[in-house]
Image (cartoon, rainbow, N blue to C red):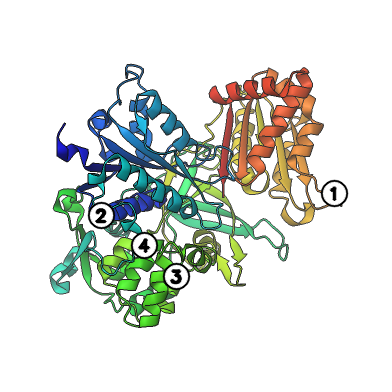
Amino acid sequence: MEEKKNNKLLILYASQTGNAMDAAERLSREAERSDCPAVSVLSMDEFQPSDLPNEETVIFVVSTTGQGETPDSMKEFWRFLLQRNLSREWLKRVHYAVFGLGDSSYQKYNFVAKKLDKRLLDLGATSIIERGLGDDQHPSGYEGDLDPWMSSLWNMLYQKNPKLLPKGPDFVTSEVTSIDQPKIQIIYHDVDEEQPQLSTSMDLKCLEMQIERARSMTPGKYSAKNRPGCFLKMTKNYPLSRAGSGKDVRHFEFEAVSCSIEYEVGDVLEVLPGQSTAAVDAFIKRCNLNPESYITVEPRDKENKLGASSLLFPVKLKTFVELTMDVASASPRRYFFEVMSVFASAEHEKERLQYFASPEGRDDLYQYNQKERRTVLEVLEDFPSVQMPFEWLVQLVPPLKTRAFSISSSPSVHPNQVHLTVSVVSWTTPYKRKRTGLCSSWLASLDPQQQRVLIPAWITKGSLPPPPPSLPLILIGPGTGCAPFRGFVEERALQSKSGPTAPILFFFGCRNEKNDFLYNDFWLSHSQPDGVLSETKGGGFYVAFSRDQPKKVYVQHEMREQGMKIWNMLAQGAAVYVAGSSNKMPSDVFSTFEEIVSTENRIPRETALKWLRALEKAGKYRVEAWS
């Protein structure tokens, strides 16, 4: 075996939002600081899975999305690993470690990391260290689990092969006084020369090109959206919750501007939010940038040059920031503070930033940064002596991500329209600072009568496939979880006019009947005799108002009340769809189904659980949850 092959470390990551990519890059930096001879960091969709047996030391960093799904960039890789013709010795030369990123408030916590670990063992690979499971619920986020796991990993790797980490396992935690060059370079273009290439008129084609050009230059490899699938204009924006109730839930309606919208009930709309012009201007001013400059962003490493070079047309610097860099909503990551420390000229700022970037300062950084949801702009303003080069800012400022919403309309009932049901996010931090969600508050601020804002959007498949008219449905959707089911009920009501349809049983929950009974007239009208939610058609509509009586009542209580009806529908082949908050609701609802199946059949809970797992496997128990 070649000596060189022994001393190579391969880090493969699968990231949906950028966290796993960030953790993988941190592992790479720390290995390089210990003089690891060769470190490669690749997204799983950049690596050929058939080459895995040729690697000796591989670290996998994988996130779990939604209800236990693999990130998009891992889907092909995982399909390859599941091939039945792979032998139990296929990976006998491979030593590996797995670190997962998840959220323990979800039912299938770190499911992807667990199943990857098991499959690698099944294929003959040798585990270097017990898998690490990062938890968003940890007081320090996933880094609370990553730090001790990484320390153990370096120790185990050093014992296995000291040449892999020539400076030893403890070197990686030493204080950093210098950094390498950024991974990207920015090329500035002569304004006069480039001006004709980019029309300033905001016509659709120009806007589409600007978005695609800017976002195709964004560094990093995770699920990103470049060219918009369509442009929408808002036609309606009205509150569904009562003013002063403590919640602001809105109904939005949009029409397609560019082309007709094609979607199915259960689909998801992803929206690229607009950023505050004042915040973008303040960021540009704080960083001493020229907003009128024309730039292109390219990888410094020419081997990883961005695919279609024809897309690398110059864009205005301000446009690039607006469309790709989340400067006033997302919190920067720990490495941002480490790089800031190098560019701080005031000694007290440098010391504080170095402390934040150290293992000792991790918890304090989490309190200052993530818990308070400090934005990049706020952090830069807190450390005024820091002057970071724009290359570093482009590399490290969190990317502006699309936001996903369950569509709450049927395309058959509302052609060329799409409706959303959105809770406008706002909260108070531990230090009593008011924070709002970037996308929901931006949408709520739009006035369809006054403004003609073009909204870049994409239609994607959700977790709830459109059911055929003959399929009985049991729907559980408390709060804004009712959104997709509004579309389902609209569609089935239309289908019922031209033929027989199966019944729908719908359980809705909210705090108060007067404050947040969303779409109450709509549900009640379809509950009338012969409506698709009517008991005369075998269905039903049941509401739990949790705060309208001394003892709280949730959808689970209403489900137990209708246990016999639920079981009868399940016995007739009904599908179960659950939508809403990812906190405890999905697992509480699942547990209630378990109880109902057990009680109505007089069978043990374990048998009921197996029955429900089989229902899941058959694709007839579906969950779409969001945090």
The residue identified by callout 3 is 276
How far, Cα to Cα, is label 3 from label 2? 47 Å
Contact between marks 1 and 2 (CB within 8 A): the answer is: no
Callouts 4 and 3 close, C-beta under 8 Å: no
Q: Earlier in the sequence, mark 1 or mark 4?
A: 4
Q: State the image coordinates of residue 560 (x, y, percent, origin top left).
A: 79, 32
Of circles 2 and 4, the one toward us is 2
Amino acid at circle 4: Tyr
Give the answer, above or below, for where 422 lies relative to 285.
Answer: above
- Closer to the chain start, of discs 3 and 2, is 2
Q: Tag 3, which secondary structure? A: loop
- Work out whether 446 lies above or below 293: above
Q: CA distance from mark 1 to mark 2?
A: 62 Å
**In the image, residue 192 lies at what x, y percent?**
15, 73
Instruction: Identify the residue position indicated by label 2 in the image.
Output: 167
For residue 335, the mark is 4
Report how far apart the C-alphas of labels 3 and 1 lie in the structure: 43 Å
Q: Earlier in the sequence, mark 3 or mark 1?
A: 3
In the image shown, does 260 or 456 lie closer to the viewer?
456
User: Where, by quadrant of the figure, is residue 42 drawn?
Assistant: top left
- What residue type is disc 2 on? Lys
State which mark lies toward you, 4 or 3.
4
Which mark is on residue 551?
1
Residue 189 is situated, as x and y percent measured from the top left of the image, at: 16, 69
